[in-house]
Amino acid sequence: MDKILVVIDAQVDFTTGCLGSKQAAEAVVRLQEYLKNHKNDYKLVLATADTHQNSEFDEKSTIEGSEIPKHCIKASPGYALAGDIAYYVDEVIEKSTFMADNFDSLIDDICARDYDVEEIDICGFCTDICVISNALLLRKEYPDVKICVIDDLCAGTSEQNHKAALDVMSSCLIEHCASDRLGKKK
């Protein structure tokens, strides 16, 4: 049985950049350490990358472009995966919205590798926007697979929103636990 890790939008702009926070900066350090120590626990480590163009924000041509400050412009410093995360990732999947808009290709990629998926662990940024959106998509595609959000390797737009998102995911049968408790009986 195979375990997969999906790292959601662990990019500079969401951690230490323009949309970052103290909580995100601390979580990304823990995430890097976790990847260093647990990469081999996973058959596959995927990362998503929020991917935008200047025009979306300049022309306010999308809801995100008109409601959220400019971020994750492709090839900008803020677009890059934070720290040394890229070193541990097998594949990066670009997405242009909160949810992986090419999510079918992510699912197809997992299936094409003929994995016997036992567990999908998720971490990243922001818990209450992109993490929850993608976790729910994974739950839809994998209704009988254990899905766990590694809560201390995530940060939300606020601590309150982070906790609220974890509660919503729990109600959708998506577990959450701290990285040091992952895989241990509750």
Image (tube, grey):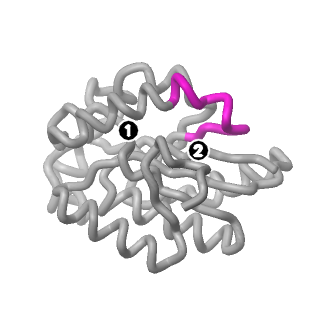
Where residue 12 appears, as percent x and y from the top left, is 28, 31
Asked if disc 2 and disc 1 are in contact, CB closer than 8 Å, the reply is no
**2 or 1: tag closer to the N-terminus:** 2
Give yes or no for residue 5 being in the magenta stretch: no
* Residue 16 appears left or right of 39: left
Residue type at the position of mark 1 = Ala
Residue picked out by circle 1: 10
For the magenta stretch, what is the residue range?
Answer: 35-46
Q: Residues within 10 Å of mark 1 (few under 14, many from 20)?
A: many
What percent of the width, then of the height, locates residue 26?
Answer: 25, 34
The spot of residue 6 in percent (x, y) is: 54, 46
Residue 13 visible somewhere in the drawing = no
Q: Secondary structure at mark 2?
A: strand
Q: Amino acid at mark 2?
A: Leu
Residue sitting nearer the eye, 155 or 77: 155
Q: Is residue 67 above or below residue 94?
A: below
Q: Closest to the observer: 3 or 15?
A: 3
Residue at 35% x, 34% y is 74
Mark 2 vs mark 1: in front:
2
Q: Which residue is mark 2?
A: 5
- Where disc 1 sits, the SS reads loop
- Name the residue rendered at 24%, 65% in the picture: 63
Gap between marks 2 and 1 measured at Cα: 13 Å
